Image (tube, coloured by chain):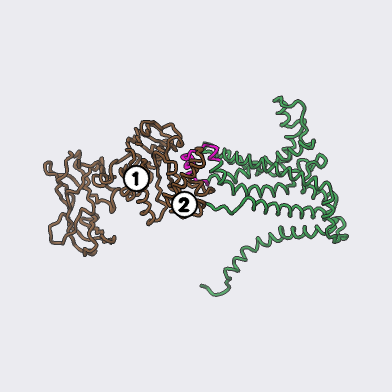
């Protein structure tokens, strides 16, 4: 079932936390609301769930307007960050609670619980209480409680953030797999861009109550719509260099220590003050005497395992991060050249933050 | 480290706890031991020289005394009804005060009022309130045409019992409210959200989320309130002196009457020992049955 958000606004008292959200989440897709804390992503999710009233605007599931419907009437299920398992109930009763409240016949309820427990491999835990489970097991029970009613829409509020790093990686893949098997629309809230990139069909990047960009993971990574998205998506983060644009037919970016032609720039710049964005992967380290776009001194070297991050100071207090293979021999205080893949460069208007690359 | 006089950690710890220990021994342990000892003696405070060991005679006396058994049953009724109403009202008021409304903090503060005022003052005020001729209760009921004749609140046996219960409920409901309110504020909100999404209405959310979370605090509150109410002396004595007749005697009043009015301190002490034994056994059984401390908490 697709989810349409039409002109959603939300205020808490005087504070407006969501501003004119217009989004269509296609049916059966895995959609992630991604943004830093305080960006309004959880509030938006809670509004879709019906746990938070909408100040203005409309929410549709398919053709049905659900604004005024209670959570129970929306046929949704939600997984909470803290799992929110009922502590006094066994896993079996936790899983069946939604069905029991809806007065489902016992045989049917038991069958549904057993089926979900088998899928999640928690059948052996059915008679335990939540306090007797590990974090990962609780996570599965919370997931099972959501799955058992076969909802149209799954809502997940940072469900992996309480797990340790290793388990999080496994659960990421499992969640993606369950999503495909269940065929429901999943709306997933996270501040972790890695989760968003790995699991989603579509990502809505949010900041300051506004959707900054809505697109596939490849789009938000490859064609960030503005400075915020450019800076937020990608690890290590994109290098952002302030400078100005020169030349109209052959646009060139110029800043102290760096001048580079920009073959991809098409949009007409509203101003000459721009920000050049280039990912560390699109920079290359070359020897001191080879031709280069930038020259500078190695300020720090970080080894990531298969890669190294090299920070090069090319002008006073101006540094770029270059990602190179771990085998590359480079030491602090070496003088190096940096080559820039101009085709992969992004240019943003400093005032509006919008991209100048069509 | 400076050489010289130093104490081990253990000695310092003992030193810190010593003042409390001394006070506790003097004011708590000694009186209890002394009361137990006295329960086996015949002791007239006017003739301490005639004190003699009488074995179980004091206990035989009270178990044969019909007034002891009347007091026991009246204490049971007074305790049970007080606890039931305190718990029900306490939880209800706590739920109301838990609502996030402007100015609610004022009401939370007001709540402490009955608790702060000394019992003597309260009892005197309530005697005026219950006064059949000029009391505000009768005046209100008569003005509202609910009753024609004034009710003799403190001088008819059943009404006197009801009045003492009313006073106790009024004074100690805030204790229940405070305990429950404190617990309510720690119930994870996500549990309510989860229950809403699962389809639970207001009543089911109360039964399946709120009440289980309150279970432990209610068990503790009920045990404490039962012990304190069963032993309560001053409220009954100040309001009705156990009367009319002996209709509002509880065991504490009985013990007092035996000790002070009848000068049988040994019998009074024996009554105290019986109360202690009954309450200990009752509390242990209750804690076992309710499964206190066996329920694992979920973070």
Give the answer, above or below, for where B263 lies relative to A42. Answer: below
In front of the other: B161 or B80: B80
**Which residue is rendered at x = 32% and y = 45% of the image?**
A200
**For the magenta stretch, what is the residue range?**
B186-206
Tally of numbered discs: 2
In front of the other: A118 or B110: A118
Q: Chain of mark 1?
A: A
Q: Earlier in the sequence, mark 2 or mark 1?
A: 2
For chain A, the rendered hue is brown
Check disc 1 and report the residue beneath it.
Answer: A180
Q: CA distance from mark 2 to mark 1?
A: 22 Å
A348 to the left or right of B285 = left
Quadrant placement of the C terminus of chain A: top left
Quadrant placement of the N terminus of chain A: top left
Q: The residue tagged with tag 2: helix, strand or loop?
A: helix
Answer yes or no: do the residues labelled 2 and 1 have beta carbons within 8 Å?
A: no
Q: Position of residue A300 (x, y in %)?
A: 26, 61
Does the stretch in magenta take in B191?
A: yes
In front of the other: B211 or A74: A74
């Amino acid at each position: 079932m697709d989810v349409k958000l039409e002109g959603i606004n939300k205020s808490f008292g005087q504070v407006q936390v969501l501003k004119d959200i217009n989004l269509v989440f296609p049916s059966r897709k895995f959609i992630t609301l991604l943004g830093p804390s305080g960006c309004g992503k959880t509030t938006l999710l809670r509004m879709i769930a019906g746990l938070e009233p909408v100040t203005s605007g409309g929410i549709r599931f398919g053709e049905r307007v659900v604004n005024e419907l209670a959570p129970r009437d929306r046929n949704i299920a939600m997984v909470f960050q803290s799992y929110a398992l009922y502590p006094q109930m066994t896993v079996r009763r936790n899983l069946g609670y939604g069905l029991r409240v809806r007065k489902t016949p016992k045989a049917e309820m038991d069958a549904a619980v057993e089926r979900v427990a088998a899928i999640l491999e928690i059948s052996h835990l059915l008679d335990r209480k939540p306090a007797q489970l590990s974090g990962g097991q609780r996570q599965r029970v919370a997931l099972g409680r959501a799955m058992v009613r076969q909802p149209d829409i799954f809502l997940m509020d940072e469900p992996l953030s309480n797990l340790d790093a290793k388990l999080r990686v496994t659960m990421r893949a499992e969640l993606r797999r369950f999503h495909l098997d269940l065929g429901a629309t999943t709306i997933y809230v996270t501040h972790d861009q890695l989760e968003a990139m790995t699991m989603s069909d579509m990502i809505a990047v949010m900041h300051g109550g506004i959707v900054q960009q809505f697109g596939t993971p490849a789009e938000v990574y490859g064609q960030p719509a503005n400075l915020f998205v450019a800076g937020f998506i990608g690890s290590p983060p994109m290098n952002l260099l302030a400078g100005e644009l020169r030349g109209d037919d052959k646009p060139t970016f110029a800043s102290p220590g760096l001048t580079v032609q920009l073959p991809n720039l098409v949009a007409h710049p509203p101003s000459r003050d721009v920000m050049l964005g280039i990912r560390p992967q699109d920079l290359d380290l070359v020897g001191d005497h080879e031709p280069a776009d930038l020259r500078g001194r190695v300020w720090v070297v970080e080894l990531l395992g298969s890669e190294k991050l090299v920070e090069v100071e090319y002008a006073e207090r101006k540094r770029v991060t270059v990602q190179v293979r771990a085998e590359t021999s480079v030491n602090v205080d070496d003088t190096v050249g940096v080559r820039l893949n101009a085709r992969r460069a992004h240019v943003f208007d400093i005032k509006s933050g919008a991209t100048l690359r069509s | 480290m400076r050489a010289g006089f130093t104490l081990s950690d253990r000695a310092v710890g003992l030193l810190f706890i010593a003042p409390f220990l001394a006070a506790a021994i003097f004011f708590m342990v000694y009186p209890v031991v002394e009361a137990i000892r006295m329960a086996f003696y015949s002791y007239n405070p006017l003739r301490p020289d005639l004190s003699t060991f009488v074995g179980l005679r004091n206990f035989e006396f009270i178990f044969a005394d019909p007034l002891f058994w009347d007091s026991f049953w009246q204490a049971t009724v007074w305790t049970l009804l007080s606890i039931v109403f305190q718990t029900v009202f306490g939880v209800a008021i706590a739920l109301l005060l838990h609502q996030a409304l402007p100015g609610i903090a004022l009401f939370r503060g007001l709540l402490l009022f009955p608790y702060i005022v000394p019992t003597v003052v309260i009892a005197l005020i309530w005697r005026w309130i219950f006064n059949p001729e000029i009391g505000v209760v009768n005046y209100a009921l008569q003005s509202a045409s609910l009753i024609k004749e004034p009710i003799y609140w403190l001088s008819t046996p059943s009404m006197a019992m009801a009045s003492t219960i009313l006073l106790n409920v009024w004074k100690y409901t805030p204790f229940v409210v405070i305990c429950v309110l404190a617990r309510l504020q720690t119930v994870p909100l996500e549990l309510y959200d989860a229950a809403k999404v699962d389809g639970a209405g207001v009543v089911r959310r109360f039964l399946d989320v709120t009440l289980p979370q309150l279970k432990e605090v209610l068990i503790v509150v009920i045990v404490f309130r039962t012990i304190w109410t069963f032993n309560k002396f001053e409220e009954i004595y100040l309001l009705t002196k156990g009367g009319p007749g002996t209709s509002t005697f509880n065991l504490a009043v009985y013990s007092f009457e035996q000790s002070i009015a009848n000068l049988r301190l040994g019998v009074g002490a024996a009554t105290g020992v019986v109360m202690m034994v009954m309450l200990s056994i009752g509390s242990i059984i209750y804690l076992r049955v309710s499964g206190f401390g066996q329920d694992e908490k979920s973070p």
